[in-house]
Image: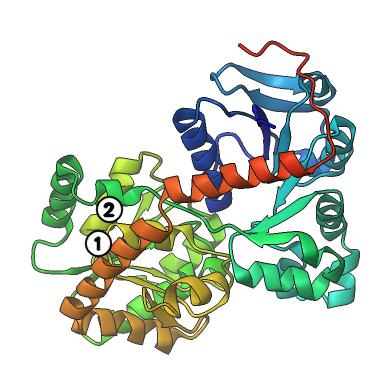
Amino acid sequence: MVVKKVLYEEWWNPATGGADKQAEKIREYINKAYKEIKIDKIANSNFINESDEVFWESHLGKRAEKYPLESLKTKNYDIIHAHATGNKLVEFNKKCKAPTIYTAHSLVIRELKEWGYSTNDAMKHSSAKVQDKMMKFSDIITTPSEYIKDLIYEHYPDYSDKVIVIPNGTDFFKYKRDKKVAMKANQIRRKYSPNGEKLIGFVGRITADKGAVDLAKAFKSLLDLGYNVKLFYIGPIYRDSKRAIDQVLKGNEYKYMYVGSIDDEMNLAAWYKALDMVVLPTYHESFSLVGLECLAMGTPFVVSYIDGPKEILVDNRLAIGILPKDISSIRDGIRYVIENSEWENKRAEKASNIIEKKYSLDNISERWIDLYVDLYSTCNYKSVFLGDDNV
């Protein structure tokens, strides 16, 4: 049996967060690399609000901003791969009668508990109930890390026999020796490190729960100790966090800056290459795509010793672990990389080679292809394509 058409269900268009970007990256890669399999996508931030219309994009790039969800049933996809959740999606997926994969990039219960909900109250929350439905009515549940898999085992033991781990992947190592990227990185260093300043980067959502404010406090401590350092926030800026960061670093405005979001991969790769380290003192993280990208470029990575990063990066000695919410630990992690830069650069270079072998986008895409084929061949579904295959 041959898989021909797959439907991706995503949250946002264009992709914004790490999970969305990873899903879109895999979709684009498979569409280019595998002629036999075509992946369309739908996206809508209002799935949770039960929208009847979605953004739709075919594998050939044709788009419709408001495509009726019900009309997609006529296309009879061979596989549905959901990255988003919503009651409408659950009902739509059941009506399509196609084998369904749900990728749990995170677990809603975990997030609710971090916000102060008890386990009981979290389980009853509407968002958790929708995610429960997505898992219940899916043939396979995938997670990017053993950490999320273990959480599903703990909170949803009935689904444990259909959970598998497929990690995230990256192809950023292709930029490591790119001459244009190297030139841009040198320009960044000449501009921001004329006197040998150590350049520290934060990449991701600039929010308190990602540790952005805590990093500012640790950075201020380094300045007070006399370290010659500069801090760069790369990512979408959130007003409350920016206000808190600016308050912490008041009087040191020339020592830090907000770069903003960088959508161009080569430009982002140049920043990774230019920085002396990237620091992510996050309170929670299922995997850390930023860590893969950073280390793929051979730049040291300092990250909270929790969740996915602990399992995938720190315990495998690819990155430096710090304690979240602990300003002294964050500061000391940065100091360690500064004072042991030769050793840490070598560690990051070794990490880059490991990531290229273990987490390359082509290797991870192959695992998805194998899963699609295995699932389709073992499920008792029939797919009769009724639409226009050239759309």
Where is 46 relative to 122, above or below?
Answer: above
Question: At 72% across and 63% down in the image, what residue appears?
Answer: 107
User: Against 126, is 305 above or below?
Assistant: below
The 10 Å Cα crowd at callout 2, few under 14, some 14 to 19, many 20 or more, is many
Picture quarter with the N terminus:
top right
| Mark 1–mark 2 CB contact (< 8 Å) | yes
Decide if residue 239 is on the left or right side of residue 333: right
Q: Amino acid at mark 2?
A: Trp
Task: Specify the amino acid type for callout 1.
Answer: Leu
Is 303 left or right of 160, judged from the image as shown? left
**Extreme residue in the front direction:** 1
Expressed as whole percent of the image width and height from the top left, the position of residue 368 reads: 58, 46
Above-or-below relation of 114 to 234:
below
The extreme left residue here reads 195
Res 291 → quadrant: bottom left
The structure residue drawn at horizontal position 27% and vertical position 53%, both measured from the top left corner, is 271
**What residue did someone put label 2 on?**
271
Q: Quadrant of residue 99?
A: top right
- Residue 193 rendering spot, x and y as whole percentages: 14, 62
Asked whether residue 120 is in view, the answer is yes
Residue drawn at 29 percent across, 43 percent down: 267
Residue 74, horizontal then vertical, whole percent: 81, 18
Residue linked to disc 1: 275
Tell me the SS state at disc 2. helix
Judging depth in this view, the residue of 311 and 358 nearest the camera is: 358
The mark found on residue 386 in the picture is none
The x, y position of residue 297, in whole percent, is 28, 57
Q: Nearer the viewer, residue 341 or 259?
A: 341
Q: CA distance from mark 1 to mark 2?
A: 6 Å
**In the visual, does 39 lie left or right of 342?**
right
